[in-house]
Image: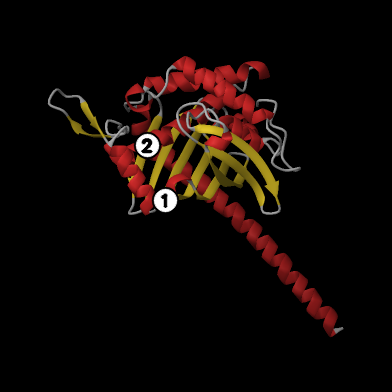
Amino acid sequence: MKIFVRLSHFLCVVLLLICTLGNASSTVAANDAEALRGHYEALSKQLSDNPFGLPLYLESTEATDALKGDIYAVVDYPFKTVNSSLNDPVRGPANWCDMLILHVNIKHCQVSNDRSGTKLIVSIGRKFEQTPEEAYPVEFNYRVAAAKPDYLKIDLTAEKGPMGTKNYRILLEAVAIEAGRTFLHFTYSYGYGMAAHLAVNTYLATIGRDKVGFNVTGRQADGQPEYINGVRGIVERNTMRYYLSIDAYLSALNLPDDQRLDKRLDKWFSATERYARQLHEVERQDYMDMKHNEYQRMHALPKASSGMTDPKRPN
């Protein structure tokens, strides 16, 4: 009888913990959703009046050994559309690959499932066509951190990146707002050591010396803006490229499958040319040809594991 009482007590404790943790998780998601709506309200002026000509706000921060870019933006897609595509229970990770490949530096993306969870193997390379073998593979852990009827949070993290970079994080939050629109928060961040620091300094002293970001640091004598440069300029440009990939991906969901890729490529390139001072790297036809080849190569390669979802149909 004592053993039975103790066992019953143990089971009650376990159930209590499960319920408590479940409630805690729901509370955290609710708090995150409320916090994101708070950002939407706090940034109302910046979203309505900014140099982008869009309801978009970008900020960047630089620490001793880390960089971070954040974008807050309103998109004209219902939350249900955003959630059903980026958080599809079967194709969600593969849809992320179809989205990430739009970025000029992403050469390949493959989904892998194993005991530790879902991973995106993302190959990062140059601004011209490369095979996955010629690029640098970065293994992102893919995690749906929260999924509620009006709030979504997806977290991608990677320990190592190219040239000694580390602690990569790609974070997407989305929350439903009025008029059938969605408010997005996108974060792109990474850390770096001595090797990456030297490589970046070499880049900034040579081919990257005239590159700038988006935030204005002052005005020239003729009134023209002076944009932030250096490493914060780098992270701002990449944060914007990733955000434009999200927007371009979502823009084609209402089209037939065979029309989606061209729509997304055209949308992404046109959006980057809108900010040519910061983002122009290649000509339109070169970009289109390169991405068509990389996309076809991405979908032709064998699956990374038996549990990998089939990404052949664009979504």
Q: Note whether 228 is above or below 11 in the view shown.
A: above
Residue at the spot 46% in from the left edge and 20% down from the top edge: 269
Q: Of the two numbered discs 2 and 1 on the same chain, state the one appearing first in sequence.
A: 1
How many angstroms separate mark 2 from mark 1 (CA)? 15 Å
In percent of width and height, residue 23 lies at 63, 57
Name the element at disc 2: helix
In percent of width and height, residue 162 lies at 47, 45
In percent of width and height, residue 123 lies at 55, 38
Q: Is residue 128 left or right of residue 17?
A: left
Q: Which residue is mark 2?
A: 236
Q: Callout 1: 10 Å neighbours few (<14), some, many (20+)?
A: many
Residue at the spot 38% in from the left edge and 26% down from the top edge: 279
Q: Is residue 213 left or right of residue 141?
A: left
Q: Which residue is mark 1?
A: 191
Name the element at disc 1: strand
Q: Callout 2: 10 Å neighbours few (<14), some, many (20+)?
A: many
Name the residue nearer the viewer: 49 or 134.
134
Q: Note whether 273 is above or below 177 in the view shown.
A: above
Three-letter code, disc 1: Gly
Which quarter of the rendered picture does the N terminus lie within? bottom right
Which quarter of the rendered picture does the C terminus lie within? top right
Q: Is residue 135 left or right of residue 302?
A: left
